[in-house]
Image (cartoon, coloured by chain):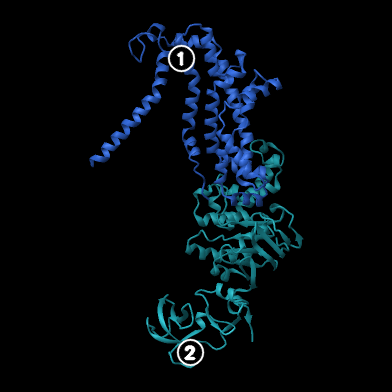
Chain colours: A blue, B cyan
Amino acid sequence: MNRRPLLGQLLRHVVLWLGLVIVLAPFVWMVSTSLKPPNEIFSTQLSLLPHKWFAAENYHKAFTKVPLLRYLLNGVIVTAGIFALQLAVALPCAYALAKLRFRGRDVLFALVLIGLMIPAQAPAIPRYVMLYQLGLLDSYAALILPFAFSAFGIFLMRQFFKTVPDDLMNAARIDGLGEFEILCRIMLPLAMPAMLAFGVISIVTHWNDFFWPLIVIQTGDLATPPLGTLFFRNEEAGSDFGPLMAGTVVITAPLVLLFLAAQRRFIEGVTLSGMKG
Amino acid sequence: MTKKAGISLDGVTKSFGAVEVLRDVSLDIADGEFLTLLGPSGCGKSTLLRIIAGLERNDSGAISIGGRRVDGLRARDRDIAMVFQSYALYPHMTVAGNIGLPLAMRRMNAWQRLPFIGRFLPGTRAARAGIAREVADVAQSLDIGQLLDRKPGQLSGGQKQRVALGRAMVRHPAAFLLDEPLSNLDAKLRVQMRAELTELQRRLGVTMIYVTHDQAEAMTMSDRVAVMLAGKLQQVAPPRKLYDDPETLAVAEFVGSPKINVIPVDGGFQAVRPEAMELVAADAAGAMAGRIRLVEHMGSESLVHVEVPGVALPLIARLDALSDRDPQRGEAVGLRPLPGRTLRFDAKGVRVRG
């Protein structure tokens, strides 16, 4: 065995492990805290596992003190609604931008790219005013509609559609498919990996979004999971960290599971491994 | 199942921006004819095929298929099928799905084609069964019957080619358009497919337009070859006539390998095919004296490159393998065209006869 590659590998693993510890530490601490009774949480001793298991109490409290299930359901409704609308807008847009020839296409694509660079917070106030005038504040619509247009989604899908050979669509046109059917029957099945990647990104972003729900939602029943944790703290006056962390674990878990399930295709999608004829 | 399907083009032009891709192309293709569009890449032959297919629009001129004007019609309404260089098979569908799609699009309505729901609508089952039967027949005739459940990714190049052909054949179109269909195959398979395609065309009796840059394909397969250079049809003729009796110097130079020998003379050019160039003694009567620069032994023949003063490129003489001559590099020799085998062209490259 050669020594230098071994040393290099060792170094590489040390660096990766360090990174892993830094990234994972807060999550581990969150899970650990959710299992401990209050006195252990604030004790000066550092231990990952509790001396006295308090998990049942913490999780029970998390589900009963606030309507945690309701928040989770809201999260599902909002993220699913946003993703569905984003696809409905982004797929036809991306197909047109990638594959159809029409006047002004490049200008439109440039606008999409500019849209990509605008932070979500920048148009918050005009959006708020518009929703107010439509009378939609404090509703699911307020949580969903502003995100129906996703510049990132259009961009990602357009880049993917670009990799599909033109002749595939020409063949479909000769076989009798219209443009809409080409999109549904040919492009969509091929674009699955990219759609999945976009799905993971979109769902994670909007599941975790705290800023926008905080602005437009007053009714507790409409709170998304992150907003729910805020209500949790308010309700408890003090900070009851055990149940709070238990709630946070419950809120985070679906995302982790989603990513694990979609992991392989997600990576396929972001690396845009197009197909070869 | 024969339809009257001659194709006629009348004054077709096409420009991409300022670039004129097709200049006034007129051509009549008889019903059941195998016509090849031959030209170097970028000459506009693929664009012309796409215009006939309805995938591009012509700027002016008229196109009819089977006596029916089709200029304004969409690709799917022109009753043609096309085979692409890349095969363009749908990667997510099985072979059966690929071949059957054109039939499904024509025989089933939008509701019946829906996944799941469509299955329960009246007529869907019968339509699907009919399509499956015809797909199986076509696959059988192309010798890919055992591949129906595979996806294109699991097929070899030759098999993909057959699937693409099957997809074209299955709905009995009035004409087949083929865009360099053999250029992605290896050399051996290409020669085999050449024969198979010709045989298939004769059997179906269908009009076929075949685009290629490979003159061997054009010469071996076609009833007639249309040579296209720089967006203009140069000559349309049967392969033999094209080779022996070219109308322009450009055609004479493009067709034939090795290239025809061109000798500048007063007021034009003389051109002599390598096999019509006789290798003689340097001082023979009527011979051009030169020196051998290179001898290529090809097995069945040898190509002798001779440098002749006053001619830019070396002239090539083809020497039969049975010849007793054994020319050597550096040898002084004479070249003499066989009597009656010299083609004359004027300064513009147009053939001068008589």
| Quarter residue B182 falls in | bottom right
Q: Compared with residue B36, is residue A231 higher up or lower down, i.e. above or below? A: above
Q: In what quadrant of the picture does the C terminus of chain B appear?
A: bottom right
* Residue type at numbered disc 2: Ala
Q: Amino acid at mark 1?
A: Met
Question: Which image quarter is the N terminus of chain B in?
Answer: bottom right
Give the residue displayed 56% in from the left and 72% down from the top: B254
When the figure is inspected, residue A76 is found, relative to residue A193, above or below; the finding is: above
Q: Which mark is residue B287?
A: 2
How many C-alpha atoms fall within 10 Å of the one at disc 2: few (<14), some, or many (≥20)?
some
Give the chain of mark 1. A
Spot occupied by residue A174 in the image (x, y as percentages of width and height): 66, 52
Vertical comparison of A88 with B6: above or below: above
Query: Do residues under tags 2 and 1 come within 8 Å of each other at their CB atoms?
Result: no
Residue A73 percent coordinates (x, y): 58, 19
Which structural element holds mark 1?
Answer: helix
How far apart in space, not on screen, are marks 2 and 1 (Cα)? 101 Å
| Residue B49 percent coordinates (x, y) | 64, 60
Residue A245 tag number: 1
**Which chain is mark 2 on?**
B
